[in-house]
């Protein structure tokens, strides 16, 4: 996708950090920007800053875990701009660090609910409208380099981001026929407010947490992210991905060697087992037959979103 002028872009987490950088970059390209965030004050402040730059911006408070509120929010955005959504940025996310063996259900529900559930809800709300509008578009979800490897202290976060990566890979395999591009952004460290994510934890999931919130730890985290990439620079990489229809957005070159080593460790696991090559070849033939057959069946069916 190359024509950003006048397109409506919805950006979750748009009040801060990565999402705010996306609002600036795509707003400057002429998109009409809807920023969504759970923090109303921060949202209003962000909208005012974007408007000062001359960006056509509309702000909608929303907890992205809330499916009904998503429908109302997108109805409101489409009515405001008198147009359908062409770009969806699932950017809002939260993190907490603590020992995984002390994690509570509330920890899981919060991090998975926002980081994975929020992405699912955004796509479930916007994608059918994009398909019906028939004008193409692009969906970007923000995962993390953390989604490629487990972590003893951010295991829930890593699981949520791993799910976002494979979900977006799956959408990329599914949406080509509709002219809708898909990208998954995997940042390492970005200069944002994410060290303060625990302050966004909702009251309904406040009880019992394994996540560290002592001021010394939060301050150390803050210093780490202060050394990260600028959100505007990151959003320019996302623009490049959209313009060239690239799925994996991996602009943090310093993580390349670690990812390669991790993938090699996974591949090396095959060597731990003695297997029968003839049986493997037979399984492959069964897969090939299944692919051919299921492809034939799929081609004969109407698509539910267009009928
Ligand atoms: P941030 O904390 O500056 O911005 C996140 C925004 O999401 C905040 O404005 C927050 O109010 C909003 N938010 C939180 N829960 C929400 C909910 N339930 N509904 C709606 N909005 C909600 O953090 P940052 O860094 O900009 O985070 C953006 C994305 O980037 C996240 O998905 C994060 O996991 C990802 N990321 C960030 C990295 C970094 O180093 N900052 C590294 C890797 C990934």
Image (tube, rainbow, N blue to C red):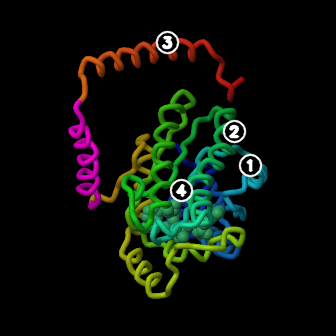
**Residue 263 on the magenta span:** yes
Residue at figure coordinates x 49%, y 61% from the top left: 157
Mark 3 vs mark 1, foreground winner is: 3
Q: 301 or 203: nearer the eye?
A: 203
Q: Earlier in the sequence, mark 3 or mark 1?
A: 1
> Is residue 27 visible in this depiction of the protein?
no
Q: 66 or 238: nearer the eye?
A: 66
Looking at the rendered structure, the secondary structure element under dot 3 is helix
Q: Determine whether label 2 and label 1 are within 8 Å by CB.
A: yes
From the image, tell me which residue sits under label 2. Answer: 129
Q: Label 3, label 4: how many angstroms apart (C-alpha)?
A: 43 Å
Q: Label 3, label 2: how many angstroms apart (C-alpha)?
A: 30 Å
Q: Label 4, label 1: how many angstroms apart (C-alpha)?
A: 18 Å
Q: Earlier in the sequence, mark 3 or mark 4?
A: 4
Mark 4 vs mark 2, foreground winner is: 2
From the image, tell me which residue sits under label 1. Answer: 78
Q: 267 or 234: nearer the eye?
A: 267
Q: 29 or 109: nearer the eye?
A: 109
The vertical placement of 250 against 153, above or below, is above
Q: Earlier in the sequence, mark 2 or mark 1?
A: 1
Tell me the quarter of the picture where residue 91 sits: bottom right
Q: Which numbered tag is attached to residue 293?
A: 3
From the image, tell me which residue sits under label 4. Answer: 26
Looking at the rendered structure, the secondary structure element under dot 4 is helix
Which residue reaches farthest bottom? 216
Question: Badge 1, how many Cα within 10 Å: few under 14, some, many 20+?
Answer: some
Q: Which numbered tag is attached to residue 137?
A: none
Task: Give the residues in magenta.
Answer: 254-274
């Amino acid at each position: 996708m190359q024509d950003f002028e006048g397109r409506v872009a919805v950006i979750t987490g748009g009040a801060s950090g990565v999402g705010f950088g996306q609002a600036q970059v795509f707003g400057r390209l002429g998109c009409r920007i809807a920023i969504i965030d759970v923090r109303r004050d921060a949202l209003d402040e962000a909208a005012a800053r974007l408007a000062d730059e001359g960006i056509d911006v509309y702000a909608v408070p929303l907890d992205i875990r809330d499916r009904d509120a998503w429908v109302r929010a997108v109805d409101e955005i489409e009515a405001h701009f008198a147009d359908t959504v062409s770009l969806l940025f699932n950017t809002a996310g939260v993190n907490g660090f603590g020992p995984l063996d002390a994690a509570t259900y509330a920890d899981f529900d919060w991090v998975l609910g926002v980081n994975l559930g929020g992405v699912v809800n955004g796509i479930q709300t916007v994608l059918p409208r994009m398909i019906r509008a028939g004008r193409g578009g692009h969906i970007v979800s923000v995962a993390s380099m953390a989604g490629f490897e487990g972590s003893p202290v951010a295991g829930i976060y890593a699981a949520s981001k791993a799910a976002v990566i494979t979900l977006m890979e799956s959408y990329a395999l599914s949406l080509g026929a509709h002219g809708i591009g898909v990208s998954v952004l995997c940042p390492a460290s970005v200069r944002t407010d994410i060290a303060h994510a625990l302050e966004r934890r909702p009251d309904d999931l406040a009880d019992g947490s394994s996540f560290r919130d002592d001021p010394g730890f939060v301050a150390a985290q803050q210093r780490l992210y202060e050394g990260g990439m600028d959100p505007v620079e990151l959003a320019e990489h996302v623009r490049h991905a959209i313009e060239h229809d690239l799925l994996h957005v991996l602009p943090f070159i310093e993580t390349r060697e670690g990812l390669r080593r991790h993938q090699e460790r996974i591949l090396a696991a095959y060597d731990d087992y003695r297997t029968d090559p003839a049986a493997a070849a037979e399984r492959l033939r069964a897969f090939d037959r299944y692919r051919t057959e299921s492809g034939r069946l799929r081609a004969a069916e109407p698509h539910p979103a267009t009928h």
